[in-house]
Amino acid sequence: MERFFAFVGMVIVLLAVLAGVLLARTAMMPSRQVDPPPYTPVTFDAQRAAAHLAEAVRFKTLSHQDSAQFDPEPFEQFRAFLAERYPKAHAAMQREIVGGHSMLYTWPGGDPAAAPIILLAHYDVVPVEPGTEGDWAHPAFEGVIADGFVWGRGAIDFKCGVIAILEAVEALLAEGFQPRRTVHLAFGHDEEIGGLNGAARMAALLEERGVKAHFLLDEGAAVVEGVMPGIAGPVALVGLAEKGYLSLELVVEGKGGHSSTPPPQTNIGILATAVARLEKNQLRARLEGPVREMFAHAGPEMTFPMRLVMANMWLFQPLVKRQLTALPTTNAALRTTTATTIFQAGTKENVLPAHARAIVNFRILPGETADTVLEHARRVVNDSRVRIAPVNPDDINNPTPVARTDTPAYRALAMSLRQIYPDAIVAPALTLGGTDAKHYYGVAENIYRIQPMRFTQEDLHRIHGSNERLAIENLADGIRVYAQIIRNTAS
Ligand SMILES: [Zn+2]
């Protein structure tokens, strides 16, 4: 009995020590938020800006997968519209047309030796899915302003970026602002189909001219609410990197024949087994890089129980990982995802197909590459009857490098965001989709991704979907942020 009490006593002491360590680490976790100094917002007319965005929506600047469907006329008209609506900006900046329709602006800085800043947006949009036209409360290309919103395709993705940046420049010029650093605006025309004619060529041109940017900003994250456990208010997520992209084709070719005398395993069975192995043996979930940084920046601002967890990842990491991998969206931030998207074989019920084919799409986490994923797939499938190769070698993107958060540019960006959204915390993130920014690593090391506007989960479903719309007040805040970013980084 005595021994039992001694044992219980020891357990109590150990638990007390553990609790002490957990609490001490929680208390010592420093806030990483930048204190926003007071500022005077730029002066502009938000209603007029909204009217400009509504006008912008009316140009059918569509990107089609099939390039034969491309219609250049709306793109030309859009460019003329910008020059007309933003006279000061177009007088102060030089505009070059690159790759046919992309626009590269140069606003020369007073100090030619200072590294320039580059702000990205794109003005192409995806088509409305045929058959969904009737789902729109206001037609997608009419540019209707109603209930405090600008409605239409491109209102969020990403004509609002073009409009907000030019409104900010116009407003800054009106107040006599002259940048010290050169400011480049690069507005792509084919972001939705990969940016190879627009962003890639503008980036090549800048690289040719020897540009090494202070930083570059593109879309790829936003100010969001209700996505981070332990944080009730908004979080301004800044993407530090984007995932890579690889589609692998799995092919089984062999004898066909009559289904009355089948072999023990058919081509379909072989292929199905291969796909099942890939799904069962996913690439490892890792709490590293941008996601780790996200928790380091957001953790100190969380409610107590979550803060305790964040401060003690040495103990809770397996638990946190399990929670995060349980949901598709957070799972995608932790690992290279595996998604079988095409499976084809067979045409007749009594014939064994000689050919079976599947396509598996991978979104690659920073730290891995297309090569390591291909290697993983071959090892996991482990069947010489299955030929595995990239579908299209030209359509492979490795994950981008990861931008740093200990740079003056990141701090200035965080400060600008907190000046306009004082109730928000700023945290790094990983961008899950692709953006034009990936083409610019030759001209900028520090590439950050945020569309500086507030969105709900519901708003995000409207991107590339029906009823895309942007609140006028949200557009106005976006203009304020872009103006602050230019003031805080280029002056
Ligand atoms: Zn976009």
Image: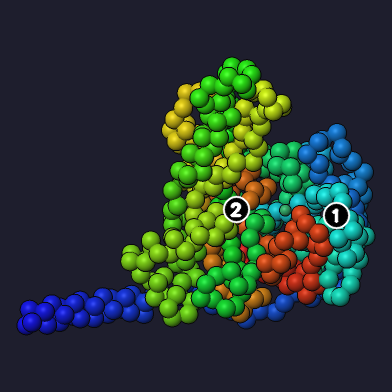
Is residue 92 visible from the viewing direction of this image?
no
Instruction: Determine which residue is flagged by label 1.
Output: 132
Residue 473 placed where, x, y %?
Answer: 78, 75
Q: Nearer the viewer, residue 390 or 263?
A: 263
Give residue 432's mark.
2
Compute the Cα span from label 1 to label 2: 26 Å
Do labels 1 and 2 touch, CB within 8 Å? no
Circle 1: element type: loop
Q: Going from the N terminus, do you reach mark 1 or mark 2 first?
A: 1
188 lies above or below 92? above
Q: Does residue 189 appear to the left or right of 266 in the view shown?
A: right
Q: Nearer the viewer, residue 346 or 100?
A: 346
Q: Does residue 263 appear to the left or right of 322 in the view shown?
A: right
- Screen quadrant of the N terminus: bottom left
What residue is at 58 percent from the left and 58 percent from the top?
329
Disc 2: residue Cβ within 8 A of ligand 1's nearest atom: no
Q: Does residue 168 appear to the left or right of 436 in the view shown?
A: right
Examine the image and state in which quarter residue 440 appears. Answer: top right
Residue 402 placed where, x, y %?
Answer: 51, 51
32 lies above or below 431? below
Q: Nearer the viewer, residue 96 or 421?
A: 421
Is residue 171 visible from the viewing direction of this image?
yes
What residue is at 39 percent from the left and 75 percent from the top?
308
- Screen quadrant of the C terminus: bottom right
Residue 257 placed where, x, y %?
Answer: 63, 17
Circle 2: element type: loop
Q: Nearer the viewer, residue 425 or 304?
A: 304
Name the outermost residue toward the front. 260
What residue is at 70 percent from the left and 62 percent from the top?
460
68 lies above or below 364? above
Q: Does residue 308 appear to the left or right of 274 in the view shown?
A: left
- The kind of residue on which mark 1 rests is Thr
